[in-house]
Image (spheres, grey):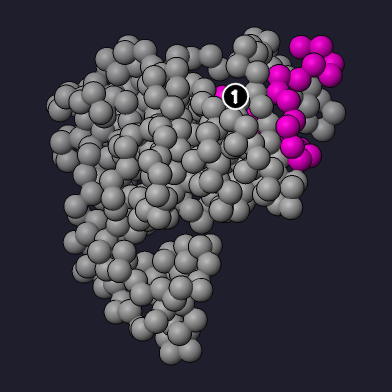
Amino acid sequence: MDDGDLPFDVLNGRPGYINLLDALNSWQLVSELKRATGMPAAASFKHVSPAGAAVAVPLTDVLRRIYFVDDVKEELSPIATAYARARGADRMSSFGDFIALSDTCDRVTALLIKREVSDGIIAPDYTDEALDILRQKKNGNYCILKMDTNYRPAPVERKQVFGVTFEQGRNEIDLSQDSLFENIPTKNKTLTPQARRDLMVALITLKYTQSNSVCYVKDGQAIGIGAGQQSRIHCTRLAGQKADLWWLRQCPKVLDLPFRSDVRRADRDNTIDIYMGDECDDVLNDGAWQQFFTRRPEPLTREEKRAWLSQNTDVSLGSDAFFPFGDNIERAHKSGVRYIAQAGGSVRDDHVIMTCDKYDIVMAMTGVRLFHH
């Protein structure tokens, strides 16, 4: 690529350094998801890692509620559905995100984006109506990038750190190939088509997530991403906690929280997270609950949480490198994981396999590491 010949056009705003890193990484993610699944895809990026990623699997009524799109009168397009899933997976982390869409941004998608706090978007195109809507964000300064879909990068990437330039070949591994899932050493070897799709979503998401990383996926969307942790088990715990919070948001007791009408969306998200956590008294004590609710809600007890979480099943989990110990499987099982794709190659593979067999989990060893830095 010649100097000054960029693979995108700036249609609005002034992108900063981190904006462009998020834009280019997220574009690679959604375009690869689209190629692998044939479905429109979206991602929500923060600090050069995805907070959410998804393909356009139709939304249930419950998901429409917890993603705050149940008030939209018109039908959601496939790309709007993918965006709602990507943004809704971890709404706390997506606050102030950079958005990527695999397909043209249409009017209904732009309307969903307009009401969220976001720094910018990259997409292959925009309808005139969508562009007019997005240009109204951030007092007219919302960053809007149009990607050249014909652009292909050079096979060698370069990065400079402290005056030293490093070179390496791009990671061009095809994560949709069936051979990735052929080595299944567990007793249970049955991968459903839905599980195979979800494992692809997990692996492609990890390909553009800061290592170490793991990703929990259900119904075509990431529901928990653990990024940039020094320990694999800490990734698994962090992502598992996010997956648990995503599922707890669907609990009837959480859905029926009596919010005041003047509580803003971001404050509502934060309040829900606190209510579901160990520090729920921060929003339930006298003097606190009145700021958010029309009446004091009953706490969500430990027993109620455990009972609800036990109903989450058929979750898929990807890892960007091997699991060194079975403790990762033990933690994954607690969040409903039934399918796993990981590189394999640990000296303790036998223990990891044995732990999977303990819970009848299907595990594919891909032989592929996806470290991203």
**Residue 13 sits in which quadrant?**
top right
> Quick one: 110 or 344, which is closer to the camera?
110
Left or right: 200 as drawn, with respect to 160: left
Report which residue position mark 1 lands on. Answer: 124
**Label 1: how many Cα within 10 Å (few below 14, some 14–19, many 20+):** some
> In this picture, which residue range is highlighted in magenta?
1-28
Instruction: Give residue 198's quadrant in the image.
Output: top left
Can you say whether 77 is above or below 295 in the image? above
From where the camera sits, is residue 262 visible?
yes
On screen, residue 357 versus residue 244, left or right, reads: left
Residue 122 visible to the viewer: no
Left or right: 216 as drawn, with respect to 356: right
In the image, what residue occupies the spot 36% across and 83% down?
A: 295
Q: Residue at x 54, y 49 (%)?
A: 94
Residue 21 within the segment the image draws in magenta: yes
- Tell me if residue 184 comes above or below residue 44 in the rendering: above
Q: Is residue 216 left or right of residue 20?
A: left
Query: In front here: 325 or 12?
Result: 12
Where does the image place residue 278, in percent across and percent down from the top left? Answer: 39, 71
Number of numbered discs overlaid on the protein picture: 1
Q: Amino acid at mark 1?
A: Pro
Residue 201 appears at what percent x and percent y? 39, 29
Residue in the image at 85% along x and 28% along y:
163
| Residue 154 horizontal/vertical position (percent) | 68, 10
Q: Is residue 24 magenta?
A: yes
Residue 64, placed above or below residue 150:
below
